[in-house]
Image (cartoon, rainbow, N blue to C red):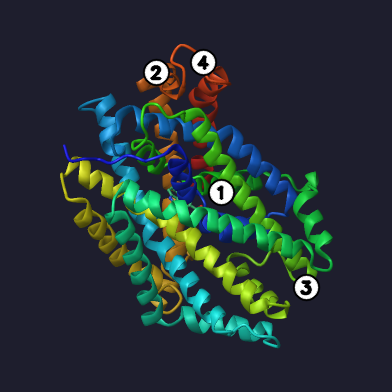
Amino acid sequence: MAERGKWKSSLGFVLAAAGSAVGLGNIWRFPYVTGKNGGALFLLLYILSVIFLGLSVMYAELSLGRHTHRNPVGAFEAIKPGSLWKGVGYLGVITGIGILSYYAVIAGWTLYYMVISGLGKFKQGITQAQVNELFSSFTSSPSLTIFLLFIFLFITSWVVSQGISSGIERWTNVLMPLLFLILLFLSIYSLTLPGASRGISFYLKPDFSKLSFKIILSAIGQAFFSLSLGMGAMITYGSYLKKEENLFSAGIEVVIFDTLVAFLAGIVIFPAVFSFNLSPAEGPSLIFKTLPFIFSKLPLGVFIGTLFFILLAIAALTSTISLVEVATSYLVDERKMARKKAAFLVGAIAFIIGIPSALASSVSTFSNFAFGKDFLSLMDFIWANLSLPLGGLLLSIFVGYVWGAKNAAKEIRHYKDKKFPGEDIWVFLIKYFVPLALLIIIGSMIV
Ligand code: TRP
């Protein structure tokens, strides 16, 4: 067995796992989904999903990983050898590459925005139409989007190739605190804008008359994606944890960090959007069209805007790292491949699969690919909306019934003879509530 590597410190693990969780999902997706779904009510439902579903599944993944010290495929196999359950692990590995392939495309955009913002493209006096034009002319350049995809995947594979503590942990130890500082600074800045309070009440004062099944579904889906659950990323990260570490508190810390970052992203964006009388329901382009326009109007706008896109690129990088790591750990553990080779191989596969997503705004075959969706949105639907809940469902059944919730709970306990706080609630959630909720989600997605 090749040397698997371990996290050096407990904080190192928390930052790496939070790095996986905190990503485009928090800073790009969360604000626009919140904006589209009416603001505060969505935020509330999101937080409930995080507490009742997200945290439960987080513990299920972390305990399975730490107990077996294996990648997702090996973890299922270690507990139920020779069964079909390792198929869930394979689904996770494939889903990871699937998500990576389009996620890295958007991550590539953040690099471009970081550069053009730094070069002062979003300067005073630019109109919204010009900002939009910049976005469409950039995303419709095949060579540029493919090049950026390549660069992003190359950097990611390189970090992963360096190993657990000397690659991933070393980088997330620096990047995550930096990200948090930038975010804090931007939040305070945004709160001081004239008219900020209207944004705050949109974001924090729930309007319960808007409650619908659809909003609940998107809140749960967002929680899963944001916490990196349902494909074994947390099994893999948990597998590098030492037995002495306290899983219970590590799990909570990761979840709090991720939720806090999403929350703050909203604090940065909504006051600014309302301050300029723009629509919070702009959709996926909120970050790439609405925000640069806002930046152009602000004092120190070039600086603030560049900082924001640096933040976004960092968040994306620490997430793509975890997506590459899942398949890499599989190749290292099960196929005995050298880590360097495995990491670059995974990056190369994601690059090839990612090309159609990179071309989703420029080549007509891919911009209207199937089911009325472009290739990138279709990939997002298949992997994030279907495959993650499916993986989460199978995982919760496995942990709840095959491995046994009681056995998993023992792994989460810090003192082996003492239950962890809320242990009985967790057992109930993972055996009954989580599978049922996910079943409903998958059912309604298919319908
Ligand atoms: N959680 C990340 C985000 O919010 C994306 C991500 C990274 C992810 N790894 C994952 C999502 C594993 C699901 C599963 O942007």
How far is the residue under mark 2 from the one under mark 3? 54 Å
The answer to the question of whether label 4 and label 2 lie on touching residues, with beta carbons closer than 8 A, is no
Decide if residue 447 is in sight here: no
Q: CA distance from mark 3 to mark 4?
A: 52 Å
Q: Which quadrant holds residue 293?
A: bottom right
User: Which three-letter amino acid code belongs to the residue tagged 3?
Assistant: Phe
SS class of the residue under badge 3? loop
| Residue that numbered label 1 is attached to | 222
Q: What amino acid does circle 1 point to?
A: Gln
Q: Is residue 48 above or below residue 36?
A: above
Which of pointers 3 and 4 lies earlier in the amino acid sequence?
Answer: 3
Q: Nearer the viewer, residue 382 or 32?
A: 32
Q: Quadrant of residue 38?
A: bottom right
Mark earlier in primary sequence (2, 1): 1
| Residue with the mark numbered 4 | 419
Residue 243 at x, y = what percent?
36, 27
Can you say whether 400 is above or below 364 in the image?
above
